[in-house]
């Protein structure tokens, strides 16, 4: 069969969105830069032209109603899910796709380029799980809220940690990479994830992706130059608003 007749990979992007966050209450509807956090994420994802579906997966009637008013596609999912990955898995049982993307709902600086890079990882045959990294800004290197990742020579994750990895014992000044909250999964990987119990490293670091590594599923990591700031605290809100103001000023200058 010619390449022209090969079926195109179908990709669904899922944005898990809980309202009952602990560190920053109701953060998904928290206004940042004039719009609720969820709007920034959804619009950033929707600008990618390579997606077949973009859906918000929530357990909140309030978020569901908000999405309907804004014209966003959204589905109710179980309130018993313990992670965004479990919520994405539920969506995978009702929306058919070759690849499911998990775009964490607290990433207001999401860009189409993030989504394209992640899709690129998932186009590689044999890749069951993919994610993104970016060179860590100085402010994030020792910040436990910014997850770091180290990879092997083939781009597979060796480990994710809230600690500063690698440890610079002899002043070698390594490049530190921050893990970004974007994942790609094949359906089989999602099915396995929900069958496995919470792993010990996952429990220690509070990082659900470690469940894949502890069970022998490699995670392939693509690099992007576009950093993001996950919103978990009031400090994160202020940092994102400052970045957004800078971006808006740049757009104004370009339009003149």
Image (tube, rainbow, N blue to C red):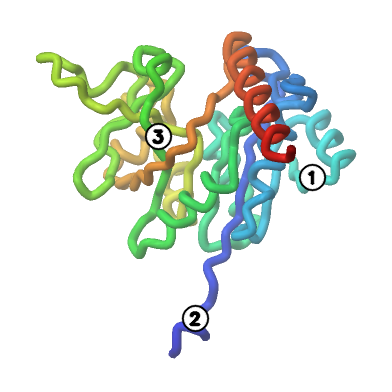
Query: Disc 3 versus disc 1: distance between alpha carbons?
Result: 29 Å
Disc 3, disc 1: CB below 8 Å?
no
Mark 3 or mark 1: which comes first in sequence?
Answer: 1
Q: Residue furthest right?
A: 69
Q: Locate residue 139 relative to residue 216 in the image: left or right.
A: right
Q: In front: 117, or 126?
A: 117
Q: Which mark is residue 6?
A: 2
Q: Residue furthest left?
A: 170
Q: Which SS class for mark 3?
A: strand
Q: In front: 75, or 116?
A: 116
Percent position (x, y) of residue 89? 56, 46
Q: Which SS class for mark 2?
A: loop
Q: Which SS class for mark 1?
A: loop
Query: Disc 2 versus disc 1: distance between alpha carbons?
Result: 31 Å
Q: Which mark is residue 134?
A: 3
Mark 3 or mark 2: which comes first in sequence?
Answer: 2
How crowded pointer 3 is (Cα within 10 Å; few <14, some 14-19, many 20+) is rated as: many
């Amino acid at each position: 069969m010619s390449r022209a007749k090969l079926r195109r990979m179908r990709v669904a992007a899922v944005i898990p969105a809980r309202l009952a966050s602990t560190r920053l209450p109701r953060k998904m509807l928290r206004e940042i830069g004039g719009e609720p956090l969820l709007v920034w994420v959804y619009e950033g994802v929707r600008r990618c032209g390579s997606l077949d579906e973009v859906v918000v997966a929530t357990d909140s009637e309030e978020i569901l109603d908000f999405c309907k008013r804004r014209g966003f596609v959204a589905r109710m999912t179980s309130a018993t899910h313990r992670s965004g990955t479990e919520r994405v898995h539920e969506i995978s049982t009702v929306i058919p796709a070759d690849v499911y993307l998990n775009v964490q709902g607290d990433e207001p600086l999401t860009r189409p380029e993030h989504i394209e890079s992640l899709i690129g990882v998932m186009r590689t045959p044999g890749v069951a799980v993919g994610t993104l990294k970016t060179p860590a800004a100085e402010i994030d290197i020792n910040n436990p809220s910014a997850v770091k990742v180290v990879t092997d020579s083939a781009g597979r994750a060796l480990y994710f940690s809230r600690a500063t990895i690698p440890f610079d014992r002899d002043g070698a000044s390594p490049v530190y990479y921050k893990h970004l909250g974007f994942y790609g999964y094949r359906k089989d990987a999602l099915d396995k994830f929900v069958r496995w119990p919470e792993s010990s490293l996952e429990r220690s670091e509070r990082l659900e992706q470690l469940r894949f590594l502890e069970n022998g599923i490699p995670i392939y990591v693509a690099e992007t130059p576009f950093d993001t700031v996950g919103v978990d605290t009031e400090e994160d809100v202020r940092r994102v608003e400052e970045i957004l103001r800078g971006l808006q000023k740049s757009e104004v200058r370009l339009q003149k």
